[in-house]
Amino acid sequence: MNQHQVIFLLILVAIAVFWVLGAYNRLVRLRNAIAAAFVPVEAQLVQRHEAVQKLTAAAAPYPPAIDPGAFDARFQRARAALEPARRQPGSPGAIAGLVRGEQELDEALAQLEGGLPLHRPPELRVALEGVSSLAAPFGFARQQFNAAVQAYNLAVKQAPTHLVAKWFGFGFSAEWPESPPPPALPEPEPSPS
């Protein structure tokens, strides 16, 4: 091998090493973007859980449409599912568990709201509005999270970056699926003044 061939070979090796480093850094940056995009999702879920607690306190004087123990169990599962997702926001299992927990909580909330009187006192209306007012900010946070996940997943499956992803254990992430809107509840009649 002459000197020119050795130099050419070293240049090719250097290019390959720099490309692998660049691809690796891109994947790390995109994975970190998922974690950053999960922060607003988490904040919205924490606010939602606080609003649900206020709603259950405001609804306590009324006959329950759902067993309080069953409602509390669903609420606790939804809260507990937040911790694994907080630790690994890109983990498909953690996101799937969180989505399942929140869907169970949605079902329990629909049952709770369905059993409330149509003539609702102000404190109950405020508590209900507190829960429902978080839907739009959560939807926006979810969209941002899903955009970060899509960018990462695209990079993981892109050729030839998928080789670097495979070598260094970068797996696919899970998006937060759009959930169907909760069932429409009857509008409360205005209380006579």
Image: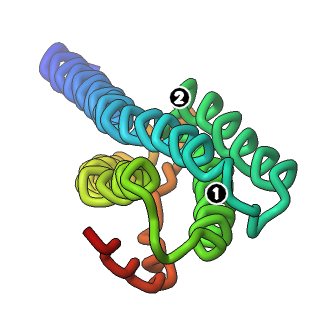
Q: CA distance from mark 1 to mark 2?
A: 18 Å
- Look at the image and tell me in which quarter the N terminus lies: top left
The amino acid type, in three-letter code, at marker 2 is Arg
With 166 as the anchor, is 67 left or right in this view? Answer: right
Q: Please, which residue is most extreme toward the left here?
A: 4
User: Which one is nearer the viewer's eye here, 191 or 159?
Assistant: 191
The amino acid type, in three-letter code, at marker 1 is Leu
Q: Of helix, strand and loop, which one carries label 2?
A: helix
Q: Residues within 10 Å of mark 2 (few under 14, many from 20)?
A: some
At 53% from the left and 28% from the top, the residue drawn is 86
Circle nearer the N terminus (1, 2):
2
Q: Quadrant of residue 159?
A: bottom left
Q: Quadrant of residue 8?
A: top left
* Residue 162 percent coordinates (x, y): 42, 50
* Residue 53 percent coordinates (x, y): 57, 39
**In the image, which disc is placed on residue 113?**
none
In the image, residue 185 above or below residue 23 = below
At 64% from the left and 37% from the top, the residue drawn is 79
In the image, residue 51 above or below residue 1 = below
* Residue 49 percent coordinates (x, y): 53, 39
Q: Quadrant of residue 85?
A: top right
Report whether residue 3 is seen. Answer: yes
Q: Please name the residue that numbered disc 2 is placed on.
A: 86
**In the image, which disc is placed on residue 105?**
1
In the image, residue 25 above or below residue 150 = above
* Residue 40 percent coordinates (x, y): 31, 36
Q: Please say which color scheme the image uses.
A: rainbow
Q: Residues within 10 Å of mark 1 (few under 14, many from 20)?
A: many
Q: Do the CB atoms of the residues marked 1 and 2 lie less than 8 Å apart? A: no
Q: Of helix, strand and loop, which one carries label 1?
A: helix
User: Which one is nearer the viewer's eye here, 29 or 75?
Assistant: 75
At 61% from the left and 76% from the top, the residue drawn is 114
